[in-house]
Image (spheres, coloured by chain):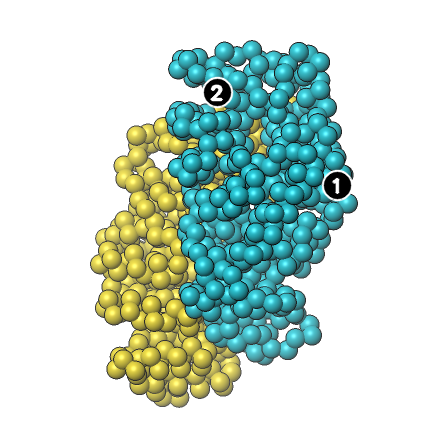
Chain colours: A yellow, B cyan
Amino acid sequence: MRIGELPTPAAVVDLDVLQRNLSRMAQRAAALGVALRPHFKTHKCVEVARLQSACGVRGFTVSTLAEARALLAAGFGDLVWAVPLSPGRLDEACLLARKAEHFAFLVDSPEASDSLDARGRRAAERHEVLLEVDCGYHRSGVDPGAGESVALAERLAAARGLSFRGLLTHAGHAYACRDRRGAEAVAAEEREVTVGFAQRLREEGVAVEQVSVGSTPTVLAADHLRGVTEVRPGNYVFFDAFQAAIGSCTLADCAFTVLATVTSANGKEGRFALDAGALALSKDPGPVHVDPRCGFGVLLPGEGGAPLHDLVLAALSQEHGHGRTRPGREKPPQVGDRIRVIPNHSCLAAAAFETFYAVQAGEVVELWHPARGW
Amino acid sequence: MRIGELPTPAAVVDLDVLQRNLSRMAQRAAALGVALRPHFKTHKCVEVARLQSACGVRGFTVSTLAEARALLAAGFGDLVWAVPLSPGRLDEACLLARKAEHFAFLVDSPEASDSLDARGRRAAERHEVLLEVDCGYHRSGVDPGAGESVALAERLAAARGLSFRGLLTHAGHAYACRDRRGAEAVAAEEREVTVGFAQRLREEGVAVEQVSVGSTPTVLAADHLRGVTEVRPGNYVFFDAFQAAIGSCTLADCAFTVLATVTSANGKEGRFALDAGALALSKDPGPVHVDPRCGFGVLLPGEGGAPLHDLVLAALSQEHGHGRTRPGREKPPQVGDRIRVIPNHSCLAAAAFETFYAVQAGEVVELWHPARGW
């Protein structure tokens, strides 16, 4: 089966580009002297996890229990559930954790900490736990400058139902950067805040074994990661149009594309429609802070090749991509033409598909089925 | 099982509100003197299709072949595939069409028309076909003022492999309106353009049986629909925060919510995190033209009740909703609290879930499993 024969919309992964991305990140983590615990949320495929494992990866990061179930079923037993524990999912998560060699929970509140501790004590277990630190993203995590954050760490360390492993942070604000230099500054902040807080805890007598940081932009931009024990990039496996715009990669590094077909074209007005819309690509607006007219992805010819910068995916409705020609191009593609879209956000686009077609030299060589849902 | 016991994030459908929406739209179509062919793409559940059928619906509109498969398997045999035919899916669609009593394709180009005709002639079949008309949305559809559009209709009517049924349009630009009055003007344009083009074709000797229009805002706002034969609203089953903002409904009419749990809260800074993010709610920006600070949905207490207008869902990452308090409220909700989110765009949010919990008076009474993918 060749790319040209796939029904559209289709999720296509370029296996050679993927492999290159995996190798480079493994080398990068080794050069930085940190363990690589990739985030599974981008691809959610055990087949990709196996390729990562072949590059030396020993543990994974997950965002959902569905991802944890998939990895555990495939024999990957060292997991960090890197979103703050949702109290209603506690029983289910603890049952999953029993199947794992290591399963670390993330908390940033006394409420979550106490409920996890209570459950551990009831079952005479110790649940591994990490404390989330806010390094400037302001999404979740404790304030590293607040005394109550030290108190929470002490509470975790003293709890008989818990095994306190250390600190975790995510510098999501790196995505607001415009280039590699900006990400380098955020990476330094991410490291300094977290390593500094670990140091403060150690001075207070709290053992901090793990210092886990990382996003794809900050890991790639970091000058050094002294004091950090592991990084958790996810997006680097596929990259996407956003990462290319902020300098994390080139467009040629983007391994995940959505293959689409032109279903309508108005030659006079330069508009066309694709059979890939908001459900296939997500409505992630992309790097509008770098290019306000970036549209909903970068378009390539169906068989691959140089980006079609004279076309823009201007809007999305549920099952339609609304294409337009840019100045310099007269006519849109024709009905029946194939287009590949590098999505703005590959994690969200990939999550829409039940099958990924892994291709090499235009030939489909494997079918992958990502975990879905929660 | 009660709402309070559901694992989050969860897709919850209020059955009483849904039933009221279905009845009202059936009455509305009857009052307008048109057939109601609801769009299946919003809910994708055969259980909801059965409730619509009980309200008098005879045929459905679909956006994907996956939706068509689900409806055909459930015994609904009168379908319109209301996106322009994607040439690569032609064989599959024609095999599905054989299982249907009526299966109408949509085209707006000679390329699609000719390929459908050729396939019909080869198999000695006549494929039902509608011509898409652009009534001002400029997504797809032929220009009703162009001579070549008349020529395409004549070509469809003359093709031996096709059975030309009529015209179809969608006034998606109604979503750019700020209120019911604006939608009324778009509804008039939608009707006039399409009925006018039908009239022109009839004058040219082309029989036009079907004149199919409709979106939820225009069907609800239309003054009259003389000359129209059917309407295809979809969103009205669930409604959402967008429809409420532009006056199609009230927030109390919104039948679909995403139940979430507060997983992080910073009392001093007024921020909190939900375990429902971009994958559960979609990154649809919502009615920013009406309220630039609308956020990613309207929040309600977990058990239902009056909207929490003093909270805003300011941003979404993959599995986190980033909540903030608004002026007038001091503290965010607490970790463990339940929140229901009326999403900006229920069609996109609903498509993320593999199970819908249908509830009545807080009790789960049915589980529904929507069709997914393509």
Q: Amino acid at mark 2?
A: His
Q: Position of residue A337 (x, y in %)?
A: 47, 26
Q: How many marks?
A: 2
Q: Quadrant of residue B201?
A: top right
> Which element carries disc 1, helix, strand or loop?
helix
SS for callout 2: strand
Q: Is residue B272 at all visible to an observer of this figure?
A: yes
Residues packed near mark 2 inside 10 Å, few (<14), some (14 to 19) or many (20 plus): many
Residue position for label 2:
B127
A98 sits to left or right of B146: left
What distance separates the C-alpha of mark 2 from that of mark 1?
34 Å
- Pinpoint residue A91: horizontal percent, then vertical percent: 34, 71
Percent x, y for residue A133?
45, 74
Question: Quick check: B161 above or below B331?
Answer: above
Q: Nearer the viewer, residue A267 or A21?
A: A267
- Mark positioned earlier in the residue sequence (2 or 1): 2
